[in-house]
Image (tube, rainbow, N blue to C red):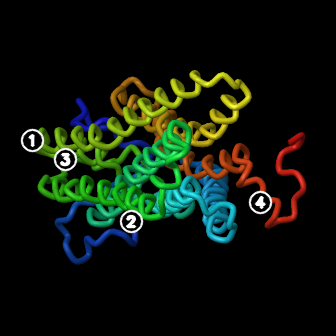
């Protein structure tokens, strides 16, 4: 993601002048508060009811998949291990992300509600950025879990206790909430002028900052600091952890054991790629907005926060033998994957 003021405001795309304020807008009580408009997918306004079908299906998959993971971790004794406790926190975070973006996305495609008030927009932005930071922190905790399991297996039970899992998960939540909390207050200090058209179907800090009038230097710098202390630092820790894991595995002579040890990291590595690749892609598109197709940009921005909640349950269902065993036990399925 990028934080800063873009060179030019995005043009009003496909909005009808007779659209009214959504239920979130509070301008009836404070008329001077700004409102923001969502553009949906430019050029495809007539087909948005059909476009909503795959989005709705993805949300259903995300909600059901992550809820199922939470139920399995809670009810199955063989999943009462640190790595699956972290997975439960990850699933809970993904549920929160889905519920944070779903109202505005479906309101656009189903009810053609294109407007949102400032307070509602800031609230949605707060949840999205906090939960994204928490998810990144949980991925770091899961990398630490794999690091200890492979590099110090004899000390695993002593290090990864229930209290350690709770502390690491709590630290991810506190860090995210603390660093994101100033963002709404920074935005409220600026007047908003122009059409106030958001390029996403939800409220996103860089997007809102681009629409602010006045000197946004400090807010942009704080946004950069937020990125460095969360996503950048987390990526570095994960890379260093896997370098250590790989170095440890290569020192072992038993190739079969090497493969089994690396296989235990497969689910986490997939979750890391699923989370960070869309994040980086949207950041690049934000930087080169002027040269990006509006359809491509809005499609990517609409799906990038949705793909992680959808794919994480699928990844763990397909790659984790313990999750597969729990699914077979609960639903009486003999084979989750053909040829298993």
Mark closer to the observer (1, 2): 1
Residue that mark 3 sits on? 212
User: Residue, x 35% and y 47% (percent of image)?
Assistant: 198
Q: In the structure shown, which secondary structural element does the residue marked by tag 3 occupy?
A: loop
For the residues labelled 4 and 2, the Cα–Cα distance comes to: 47 Å
* Residue located beneath label 1 in the image: 215
Residue positioned 47% across, 26% down in the render: 243
Q: Indicate which disc, 4 or 2, sits on the residue closer to the N terminus.
A: 2
Tell me which label, 2 or 3, sits earlier in the chain.
2
Relative vertical location of residue 191 with respect to residue 64 in this rendering, above or below: above
Real-space CA distance between mark 1 and mark 2, rounded to the nearest whole angstrom: 31 Å
N-terminal of the pair, mark 4 or mark 3, is 3
What residue does disc 4 label? Answer: 327
Q: Is residue 214 above or below residue 245?
A: below
Q: Nearer the viewer, residue 224 or 193?
A: 224
Q: Residues within 10 Å of mark 2 (few under 14, many from 20)?
A: few
Element under label 4?
Answer: helix
Residue positioned 25% across, 44% down in the render = 226
């Amino acid at each position: 993601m990028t934080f800063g003021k873009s060179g030019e405001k995005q043009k009003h795309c496909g909005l009808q002048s007779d659209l009214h304020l959504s239920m979130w807008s509070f301008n009836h009580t404070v008329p001077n508060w700004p409102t923001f408009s969502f553009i949906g997918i430019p050029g495809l306004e007539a087909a948005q009811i059909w476009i909503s079908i795959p989005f709705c299906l993805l949300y259903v998959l995300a909600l059901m998949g992550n809820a199922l993971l939470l139920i399995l971790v809670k009810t199955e004794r063989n999943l009462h291990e640190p790595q699956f406790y972290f997975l439960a926190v990850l699933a809970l975070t993904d549920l929160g992300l889905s519920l944070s973006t779903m109202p505005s996305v479906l309101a656009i495609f189903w009810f053609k509600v294109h407007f949102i008030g400032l307070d509602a927009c800031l609230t949605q932005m707060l949840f999205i950025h906090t939960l994204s930071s928490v998810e990144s922190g949980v991925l770091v905790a899961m990398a630490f879990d794999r690091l200890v399991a492979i590099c110090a297996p004899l000390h695993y039970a002593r290090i990864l206790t229930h209290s350690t899992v709770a502390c690491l998960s709590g630290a991810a939540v506190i860090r995210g909430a603390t660093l994101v909390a100033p963002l709404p207050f920074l935005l409220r200090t600026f007047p908003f002028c122009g059409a106030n058209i958001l390029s996403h179907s939800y409220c996103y800090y860089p997007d809102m900052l681009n629409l602010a009038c006045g000197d946004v230097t400090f807010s942009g710098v704080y946004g950069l600091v937020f990125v460095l202390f969360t996503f950048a630092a987390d990526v570095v820790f994960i890379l260093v952890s896997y370098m250590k894991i790989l170095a440890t595995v290569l020192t072992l002579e038993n190739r079969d054991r090497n493969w089994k040890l690396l296989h235990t990291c497969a689910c986490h590595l997939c979750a890391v790629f699923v989370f960070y690749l869309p994040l980086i892609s949207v950041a690049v598109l934000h930087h080169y907005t002027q040269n990006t197709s509006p359809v491509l940009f809005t499609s990517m921005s609409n799906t990038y926060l949705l793909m992680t909640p959808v794919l994480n349950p699928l990844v763990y269902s397909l790659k984790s033998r313990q999750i597969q065993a729990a699914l077979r036990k609960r639903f009486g399925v003999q084979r989750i994957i053909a040829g298993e």
